[in-house]
Image (spheres, rainbow, N blue to C red):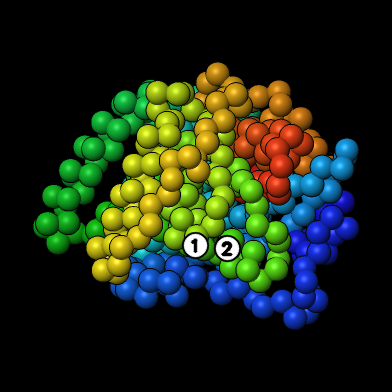
Amino acid sequence: MTDRRGVGSREWAPSTPDSLLPTPRPFPLFDRFPALLAFPRAELATLPSPVERLALPGGVELWVKRDDRDAAEYAGNKVRALEFLLGAVRPGDTVLTLGGEGSTHVLATAAHGRRLGAAVVAVRWPHEMTPLARAVAERAAELATRVVRARSVVEAFVRVGAMRWRAARTARRGGPATHYVPLGGSAPLGVLGHVNAALELAAQVAAGVLPAPARVVVPLGTAGTAAGLLLGFAIAGLDMTVVGARVGPRLAVTRRRTLRMAEATARLIERASGERLPRPSPRRLVVAHDVYGGAYGRPLAAGERAAALLRDAGGLVLDATYSAKAAAAALALARSAPGPTLFWLTFDGRGLT
């Protein structure tokens, strides 16, 4: 059973009739920090993304934040970061990024960079692939202007470094600008989009769209989404835990990286706004290590079961690399931990299945 409005269930119901619920504003970050309007932003997303309640077998309730519906063309959590990272892109410019062969970040960058009239160059490296990851790779190759294949992550970064050096030399000679989008879109400027996502969810809670979650579960890779939510919830004064479902090796995917990213983003906002921000408590970040499949891109049996359950219950499409693993962690918590659990759906599978 899915309540597609995100309100009105036997377990929980808003105190205000649906028709009288206020509509959350699309970009509460700018309401809270008007100075951030000075940052260039490409309006790529349709916000706020909806929230749904799933009633699952055994009396389990799971709330879902549908970022797979936050843009008309290619949605997902990466669009939020790209609004800022592509904000200065103009027709005729070049966008340069990198990611694994089945990277949804590369796909989103190619789709929205092309939408802005830019040429998109993507450097990719091989990893374990599923049929859905191959569909992502094929679609990204169709949309990108050029795909460069590297043999490893290290080689990809070396190639990108050389490309950035050549692009800077070309720009100094009056050539077109090249805009570098880092791995996963995870840089303080991009993380602003996920701070806004946290404030967006806080507004939906305040409007009565859903009860305040005890925890929010997201995939944890390059850490931008988790860092932004963590900081945004602290700014909103919400006592929520962010649970990051680790999808990469423990050496690369860490709590420390996530907390550093949140801190760097807080300093960015402080410099722009002149305000002092609250810092999130490290206790509010939990890393779920048990959903890692042993290699990046490798499916997890519990993730496949979670994907099938959410597909049958709500028609959701999850990818094995990221969202299925986060769903497995979210379902385990929804079944065992007190308080509402919200699963943040970061993958848009439309046109890929």
Q: Which mark is residue 202?
A: 2
Q: Give the farthest residue toward the left.
A: 173
Q: Residue tagged by mark 1?
A: 236
Q: Secondary structure at mark 2?
A: helix
| CB under 8 Å between discs 1 and 2 | yes
Q: Is residue 21 above or below residue 306?
A: below
Amino acid at the residue labelled 2? Ala
Q: Is residue 134 visible?
A: no
Give residue 193's position: percent from left, percent from top: 45, 59
Local crowd size for mark 1, using a 10 Å CA cut-off: few (<14), some (14–19), many (≥20):
some
- Residue shown at 61%/27% (left/top)? 291
Give the mark count: 2
Q: Relative to 6, is 222 on the left or the right?
A: left
Please give the name of the residue rendered at 36% of the width and 45% of the height, measured from the top-left corner. 261
Residue 107 at least partly seen:
yes
For residue 156, which quarter of the picture?
Answer: top left
Q: Nearer the viewer, residue 189 or 242?
A: 242
Give the residue drawn at x 24%, y 41%.
Answer: 163
In the image shown, does 265 or 193 lie closer to the viewer?
265
Q: Can you name the residue that lies furthest to the top here?
A: 294
Q: Using the image as rendered, state which of residue 58 and residue 130 is in the foreground.
A: 58
Q: Position of residue 190 (x, y in %)?
A: 39, 54
Mark 1 and mark 2: Cα distance apart in space: 7 Å
Q: Secondary structure at mark 1?
A: helix
Placement of the C terminus among the 4 image quadrants: top right
Decide: is 193 above or below 320.
below
Residue 255 lies in quadrant: top left
Question: Which x, y percent locates residue 113?
Answer: 42, 57
Give x and y (percent) for residue 3: 82, 59
